[in-house]
Amino acid sequence: MSKLELRNLSKRYGATPVVDAVSLQLQRGELVTLLGPSGCGKTTTLRMIAGFIEPSDGTIVVDGAEISSPARSVSPEHRGMSMIFQSYAIWPNMTVAQNVGFGLRVRKTDDAEIARRVAEMLDVVKLGALAQRYPAELSGGQQQRVALARAMIVRPEVLLLDEPLSNLDANLREEMATEIRRLHDQFHFTTVYVTHDQAEAMAISDRIAVLHQGRLEQIDTPWNLYNRPRTPFVAGFIGKTNLVEGELDGDRLRLDGLAAGFALPGGAAGGARLLASIRPQSLYLDAAPAGAVALGDVSVVGRTYLGEYWNYLVRPSGGGASLKVHAAPSTVLEIGQRSTIYVDPGAVAAIQ
């Protein structure tokens, strides 16, 4: 049985659908990220799970029991969930220890038990030495740890996180993403995490649910989303890619503007037009590793040096869409220079 299940969950404001028939299941102890651009419905979905917003249609089920539908709704405080907000929402007039122990105090837990569990949790999030400080005396990362500790100490059935790292700088976001994953692996809370940051989602998630205009485009592991996207939106949103049209000739795909074809991984039916997602790092100029296939000639129309690699924009000699190629720093080509382009066939995802 799934720990948390959304069944055709929808939310409309007037005639406008914000969340449109989203269905997904989370297994016990799984961390699933709701990922998408602003306005895609991810935070609205999270707030419906928490009980702050009532659905227009569909149901939410926890451990087989319905907790939310248009007909009835369990109040947020009785759902057994903890939520961490983008603003952290820690109380400025309470010390770190008081903030972390607040949920236990509301549940009328014995004072000695509160003190014991607060001390244990502060050690887990590496804030034991700061127990008597106030939030204004903490860094952003330390405040985030307080919010995490307060949410986890009550041992929730489901842990909900709404853009928890968006207020932090880039280096601290990476550090805290690693910390959230470490804590998840230690406590195994069933977790729903909301973010618009693709790298953050890839780093922490067991699975990622990609939302677009209120609809669930694809839910899958980070590897599958990146390497085997099912829709053009997913292919373009998760990392950089080339969306290239081509035609199947038997089991071989020939891309527009390029002379040679190659066999698609897993095979495909011939005689059809399709869209292919090819990552820039799966294309090569001038020379290529074993197994790569030469496709034809291209000319360089743009380039940017980014230190770790060259970002080239090349145009196939036979026309067709320009292609982005990431090349090693040693592959130096001038604007207008012609080159042979190669592809790793195993890295191409067909989107039919």
Image (tube, rainbow, N blue to C red):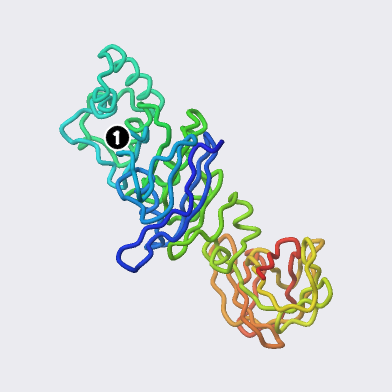
Residue at the limit of the structure toward the left, as seen here: 93
Q: Where is residue 283 in the image (x, y as percent from the top left)?
A: 69, 68
Q: What residue type is labelled 1?
A: Glu
The structure residue drawn at horizontal position 75% and vertical position 61%, both measured from the top left corner, is 346
The residue beneath circle 1 is: 77
Residue furthest out toward the bottom: 318
In the depicted structure, whether residue 340 falls above or below residue 47: below
Place residue 135 in its image quadrant: top left
Q: How many labels does the image show?
A: 1
Decide which of 78, 196 is in the foreground and name it. 78
Q: Is residue 156 left or right of residue 254?
A: left
Q: Can residue 163 be seen in this view?
A: no
Q: Quadrant of residue 243?
A: bottom right
Other-residue count near label 1 (Cα within 10 Å), few / some / many at <14 / 14–19 / ≥20: few
On screen, residue 291 above or below 298 = above
The residue closer to the viewer here, 318 or 338, is 318
Q: Nearer the viewer, residue 132 or 223?
A: 223
Q: Quick check: 284 above or below 175?
A: below
Percent x, y of residue 180 = 44, 38
Which residue corresponds to the image point at 67% horizontal and 71% vertical from the top-left?
352
Q: In x, y percent, where is residue 59?
A: 43, 48
Percent of width and height locating residue 151: 34, 33
Quarter holding the N terminus is: top right
Q: In this view, does 53 lie to the left or right of 179?
A: left
Q: In which quarter of the image is residue 349?
A: bottom right
**Residue extending furthest toward the front:** 71
Left or right: residue 347 versus residue 210 is right
Instruction: Note whether residue 330 is visible.
Output: yes
- In the displayed structure, does residue 13 sit left or right of residue 91? right
Along the viewing direction, whichever of 178 and 62 lies nearer the viewer: 62
Residue beneath the point at 77% across and 62% down: 265
> SS of the residue at dot 1?
helix
